[in-house]
Amino acid sequence: MRTAVALSGGVDSSVAAALIQESEGAAFGLTMRLFAPTDELIPGGLNRLPVAGGRKGRCCGGEDTDVARLAARTLGIPFYVLDMEPEFRRMVVDPFVASYRAGRTPIPCTACNSRVKFDHLLRRALGLGATRLATGHYARLGREPGSGRRTLARGLDRDKDQSYFLFGMTQKMMEQVLFPVGEMTKEEVRRLARTHGLPNADKAESQDICFVPDGDYRGFVRRMAADTEAGGEIVDRSGQVLGRHDGLSGFTVGQRRGLGLGGGEKAYVVALQPDLRRVVVGPREAAFCHQLETEAVNWVSCAAPSHTLECHVQVRHRQEPVPATVSMLSQGRARVRFDRPVLAPAAGQAAVFYGDQMVLGGAVIETAICDGTWLDSTTQEAGASLTA
């Protein structure tokens, strides 16, 4: 049995490689080349993305490839760099740009995991003679007694848990993937890295989205778009115009800063209306929602329920899950009703269904129904559903 390890340049994936090499003695490292060797950003979605520019705390940039290579050399395992920029661009970056311009708030890490790492990278690894692909994700894989179905659970280190970003995994993927550090804490990972003399034992955490320079999402979206983004109105919940904006890509539900409305009471983005190009603002309590409509439902650790499922649902990576009822709709859609309102669920983000520590499934948020009174400009009915 030979295992490929996806080396990002970070300490987690390097320790995963060390654990595989210790237990099997037949590991090799793979790093995805996601960026072209140029700092040039060409408008209109052409074929080059910015490199990380040497900044610390980024994943899969040029400097990280060098660190990954050095880690593989330290462990005495073969190392290969795979050019996966076209796949990454098509499946992660382009949808990211389009989603922000459509008034949604995407999570590119989810697309990168399910569509790039555990699809294209996995197939490339198998083509190189591997039987499995290991990564440095903080999550745990298991198997359900009796049915033999694979299961996905939170990582042991709750602060580092990455299961929220893995709801797109399939049974086939989980049969061919390993998460060696899922049973470890971050401090244990760093101690083991020091024991093995790994060059990234004390490397800083990756914080930003890897392809967005300096965390400027809005600037990135605008530079990569082929045309100028249309502006629109900023309105309150009654429809009164408070100001104007120059593009929906600069806003997300729950946002308070950067609204450009001057002084007065604190205002939060409570909804985006892409069809009207409007940003709706209101008090913080108006951003609490009690029901979601979701799309692209994927069941991970359990089969799809016939009608409803009682579980806990998490709508942001750093938010706590809330008790809820998930009701199946047609065409891969579901409705989520929360036992208590949740703050600022945003269209494009994930709603992940948990049973205790286990990821039962997940979906992409499409719309939200908020508790604050809203007078819809088209239906003129209070309580209309909002695109969150």
Image (cartoon, rainbow, N blue to C red):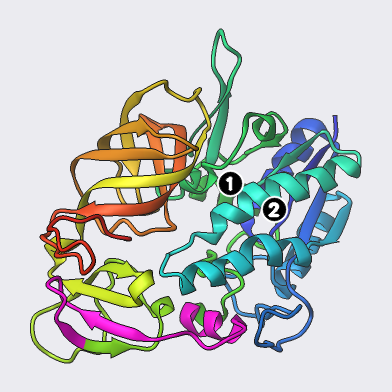
Crowd rating for badge 2 (residues with CA inside 10 Å; few <14, some 14–19, many 20+): many
* Residue at the image position 87 percent from the left and 57 percent from the top: 80
Crowd rating for badge 1 (residues with CA inside 10 Å; few <14, some 14–19, many 20+): many
Quadrant position of the N terminus in the picture: top right
Left or right: 215 as drawn, with respect to 274: right
C-alpha span from label 2 to label 1 = 15 Å
Q: Amino acid at mark 1?
A: His
State whether residue 114 appears in this view: yes
Residue 231 is covered by the magenta coloring = yes
* Residue at the image position 39 percent from the left and 53 percent from the top: 366
* Magenta region, residue range: 216-242
Residue 22 placement (x, y as % from top left): 76, 36
Front residue of this view, candidates 169 and 309? 309
Where does label 2 land, which residue?
116
Residue 47 placement (x, y as % from top left): 76, 78
Please report whichever mark, 2 or 1, sits nearer to the chain's N-terminal start.
Answer: 2
Q: Is residue 71 above or below residue 290?
A: below
Where does label 1 land, which residue?
137
